[in-house]
Image (cartoon, rainbow, N blue to C red):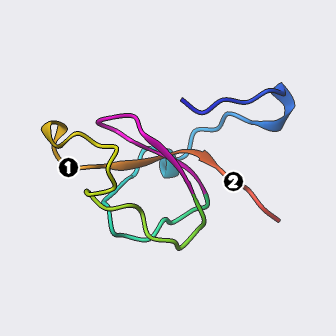
């Protein structure tokens, strides 16, 4: 689970960007923190970088395919 210290640095929003799922090997549509919906492993990644593949080493094969979902969007101006 992503953690933070100061309440004022995060804002809760409802947006389809947080419900969309992404396959390994595709580019991250947004910079931020992504979580595997099956094993809960989290990664930080820059926009356009490739989401880690099935063989990234932290995901037990018994859980099936990795599915990435955005949990924290890194907003930049």
Q: Quadrant of residue 62?
A: top left
Instruction: Check if residue 33 falls in the magenta segment.
Output: yes
The residue lying at 34 percent from left, 38 percent from top is 37
Residue placed most toward the observer, 10 or 34: 34
Q: Is residue 42 left or right of residue 68?
A: right
Name the mark nearer the viewer: 1 or 2.
1
Q: Is residue 24 left or right of residue 47?
A: left
Residue behind mark 2: 74
Q: Is residue 7 located in the magenta-colored stretch of the structure?
A: no
Residue placed at 26% from the left, 56% from the top?
54
Residue of label 1: 65
Quadrant where the C terminus is found in the figure: bottom right
Name, please, the residue furthest toward the front. 57
Residue 6 screen position, x and y as percent = 84, 27
Q: Residues within 10 Å of mark 1 (few under 14, many from 20)?
A: some
Q: Secondary structure at mark 1?
A: loop
Q: Position of residue 18 (x, y in %)?
A: 50, 45
Residues at marks 1 and 2 touching, judged by CB atoms closer than 8 Å: no
Residue numbers of the magenta segment: 32-44
Q: Nearer the viewer, residue 13 or 39?
A: 39
| Disc number for residue 50 | none
x then y, percent, for residue 14: 58, 39
Secondary structure under the numbered disc 2 in the rendered image: loop
Relative to 9, is 63 on the left or the right? left
């Amino acid at each position: 689970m992503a953690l933070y210290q100061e309440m004022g640095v995060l804002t809760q929003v409802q947006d389809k960007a947080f419900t969309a799922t992404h396959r390994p090997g595709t580019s991250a549509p947004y910079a931020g923190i992504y979580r595997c919906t099956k094993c809960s492993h989290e990664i930080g990644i820059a926009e356009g970088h490739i989401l880690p593949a099935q063989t990234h080493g932290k995901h037990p094969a018994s859980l099936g395919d990795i599915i990435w979902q955005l949990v924290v969007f890194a907003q930049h101006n």
